[in-house]
Image (spheres, coloured by chain):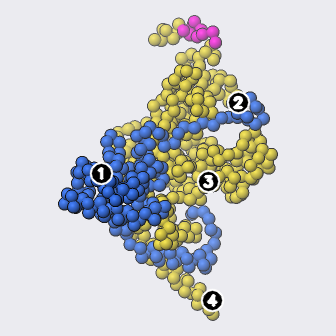
Amino acid sequence: MKIAVILGLILFAAFLMVPAASFVYESGAPGACARCHEMAVPVDQWAGSAHRGVTCAKCHGDALTTDAQFHMTNARRVVEHNFGQVAERAQLRPGDVFAILQRCQNCHPQEYASWAAGPHSVKYEPLFLDKKHNSERHLMDDCLRCHGMHYAGGIRDLVTPLNNQGPWSFRDASMADKPAIPCLTCHAIHAHGNPLKGHVRKAGISRKEDVMTPSLAFWDRRARESVSVALLPLPAVHEGERPVKMSPDQRQALCYQCHAPLGNTQVRSGDDRTPVGVHEGLSCFACHDKHKQSTRASCANCHPKMSNCERDVETMDTTFFNKNSGHNVHFVKCADCHPKGIPAKKAKLERARQ
Amino acid sequence: MLTGVKSLNRRNFLVTAAAAGTAACTGRPETPWRTLTADEATTLEAWCECLIPEDSDPGAKRAGVVRYIDIQLTRKFKRHRKAYSQAINALDKLAYAQNRGPFAALSFDERSLLLASFEKSENSKAFNMVLDHTLQGYFGSPRHGGNKDYASWRMLGVPPIPVRGRLQYSLLDPESNGGIS
């Protein structure tokens, strides 16, 4: 009987609480979310962002969200707030980052599909449990800078054992199929900017022309916040002593956070892919699709019919045509195929063309 | 839906319900500050701006130094809460005594002169405390509330995140590790 009464009271409380809380938040949205001081900053940021037309509840949930963890997190925050244990700032948990991914898909299905078909949609398992990699190289915390950057712990919390013998496994098996480079790696949803649709129309920019989306930002794992691409550095890359001509495309600064040269700034060092040779000066985005990273059909952007050599560039002996080619398309030079200089016939044609 | 707990037991539900009730009763904050009053924040902003004034780069005010101090007064600086109130009151009193107006209403030169005498008075400890915290808020990481948009790091030419490549070594190939043993 006692249990039945308690259950009845709980059900009655739930009956009243959910619509009441829903009303409180939705009546004042989005200001309702800024009732707590720690929420004021992200709400202010959102109000000036390209996503200001998307209400808080659309991405974060609301009083009617059926996920228990969502309500427990909010409850914990309120309790902590009332006990004076106020966080420096409100932040998404790693679990929320993965959940947000699905919500990005709701409004950006094409971008999501491209990302899902490309290498940046790689999951934790093939990255961290790769036998060849783990037997040849050490797993370390710095791996998480570019792979699994939203993971809250260190590499010791993620993989065991940390040696070169294995067998390796995740301490939390559920991490295996989580995306290691989700949307929030390169996009800050609350970043300052105008909604893209209006921006493109007002500026009179062709719909085919690429524009820099305001949300571009890199997730800094140490500070646990996104840094706008405008604030990220473009490195000065060198080939020997010679400074390499760099594209001024600031969007590349995102790529250089992970595909970076070593401290000696030499091209091809580390994971650098700065183009030199025939493609020197091109931006990463001149050839690579933004989300899929694919370069297919990109040659036609600059080589509409034939190359300067009057050959189909897509079938030349480069890594574009054959991954095993000795001529990496990032670094290929005329001299790689013409070690004795450009053939006279071609040179004559070239002069005639000029 | 967000990830995590699969079931909601009675205890969790009661905690959630109690907290949600509290949330519903919580009103909108009167000021954007966590611990400082609006007047205190105005005076402190003027104080910090005197210590790091704006030129071609943002000063302490635009870099959010007072926001940093305000946030930390609820956390690491809790023990300084009283000292801040006393210091701000003392400075305003001095301003009223010498200039017949609040400190924040004075010109930059007047404020600088006043702070110079404040520093040399019995309030030197409070002055140094605010100076220390101003420098922390201005030059520290933005994650703690100050250095808004990396203002000071940009002034110094320090990138928010440096470009750092990784050596592509192999433990099985000693030649590949760049000479690192």
Give the magenta part as a residue range.
A339-347
Labels 1 and 4 within one chain? no
Position of residue B57 measured from the top left corner of the image (x, y, whole percent): 35, 42
Q: Which residue is mark 1?
A: B116
State yes or no: discs 3 and 4 in contact (Cβ < 8 Å).
no
Q: Residues within 10 Å of mark 3 (few under 14, many from 20)?
A: some
Contact (CB < 8 A) between labels 4 and 2? no
> Which residue occupies the extreme left position in the image?
B100
Chain ID at mark 3: A
Labels 4 and 2 share a subunit: no
> In which quadrant of the rendered image does the N terminus of chain A lie?
bottom right
Q: Which residue type carries mark 2?
A: Gly
Left/right placement of residue B74 relative to residue A256 reads left
Q: Residue at x 69, y 52 (%)?
A: A156
Q: Amino acid at mark 3?
A: Tyr
- Of all chains, the one bearing label 4 is A
Q: Which shade is chain B?
A: blue
Q: Which mark is residue A3?
A: 4
User: In front of the other: label 1 or label 3?
Assistant: 1
Could you tell me which secondary element the residue under label 3 belongs to?
loop
| Label 1: which secondary element | helix
* Camera-nearest residue between A296 and B37: B37
User: Mark 2 = which residue?
Assistant: B179
Q: Residue at x 45, y 31 (%)?
A: A248
- Expressed as whole percent of the image width and height from the top left, the position of residue A199 reads 37, 45
Give the chain coloured yellow. A
Front residue (pair B21, A90): A90
For the point 59% across and 59% down, which residue is it? A95
Mark 1 closeness class: few <14, some 14–19, many ≥20 residues within 10 Å:
few
Q: Circle 3 sits on which residue?
A: A151
Disc 1 versus disc 4: nearer the observer: 1
Amino acid at the residue labelled 4: Ile
